[in-house]
Image (spheres, rainbow, N blue to C red):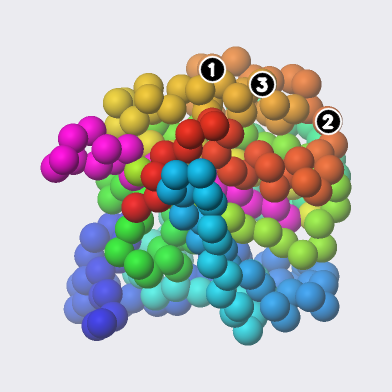
Amino acid sequence: MSEVTTCAFCGRSPPEVRITKEHVLAKKFRERFPEAPNQRRWDNKVYIYSSDTNPSFVRDTPQGPFNSTIRRVCNECNNGWMSNLENEADSHLMSLIYGEPVIRDNQMRIILSAWAAKTAAVYALLHKDGVNAVPEHHYRYMRDANWAPPYTHVWRGSGEFNSNTMLRYVRGSLERDANECDHVHLSAIWIGHAVFYVLGFPNEYAEAVLIEEISLLDQSPIERLWPLEQDNHGNVRSLAYDEVRALSMWKKSAPPNFS
């Protein structure tokens, strides 16, 4: 398979732009955050939902999450708006990573939700199986607006300290009819104490079908960051290891099929 040479965020290709390596998690985390010895083995799990079974396939990668890169971002996006967003989010992220539980204001929510949505979208690009549950127009929107995209919901939680950073990208599909299918994703990012959940839909229809997933996350002991106009959940408490992982999976008894 030939390498993709189009920027996922702006849609431009060489020679107009240069495609560069983009870290899924910025290099600053590798420099500031102590890596645990077991990060030498990083499990990348793909869950396939069908009938009553939920099999998973594990791929071992010879690197930790702070070293993982993709070649799907151009130099202008990488060194421009994405770098600016990382710099804006830096102090907020470090506070949450090391246990400060307070979200101060809406500006902090906007920045953190944009960072989480962007990180989830970049991580999705690592999965080169032809099924990206983050819609193309979400990449364009994030580049143009620097906000979390439409039909995207972001929460943050506080977990027990995790020295073995976890990234999870669980996809599902909703079949409208024989010729149309909507892909959705639930992504989780866990660094230190900071936990983020990103639930993304391509359109209003898919969002409405899975309103129960949104409601269940809103009822969990985590805080909604995005959209701003929806009520924030104030009952945040420290999550145990198993709770963080459980919230990163579909909650409904009959989850959507993986595609």
**Residue 219 marker:** 3
User: Furthest residue to the front?
Assistant: 52
Q: Amino acid at mark 1?
A: Gln
The percent position of residue 7, horizontal first and vertical second, equals 30, 65
Which residue is at the front of the view, 115 or 205? 205
The answer to whether residue 66 is above or below residue 241 is below
Circle 2 packing at 10 Å, graded few (<14), some (14-19), many (20+), is some
Which residue is at the front of the view, 131 or 73? 131
Q: Residue at x 83, y 30 (%)?
A: 237
Circle 1 packing at 10 Å, graded few (<14), some (14-19), many (20+), is few
Among numbered discs 3 and 1, the one appearing first in the sequence: 3
Among numbered discs 3 and 2, the one appearing first in the sequence: 3
The percent position of residue 230, horizontal first and vertical second, equals 54, 17
Q: CA distance from mark 2 to mark 1?
A: 20 Å
Where does label 2 land, which residue?
A: 237
Q: Secondary structure at mark 2?
A: loop
> Of the residues tagged 2 and 1, which is closer to the observer?
2
Q: CA distance from mark 3 to mark 2?
A: 12 Å
Q: Secondary structure at mark 3?
A: loop
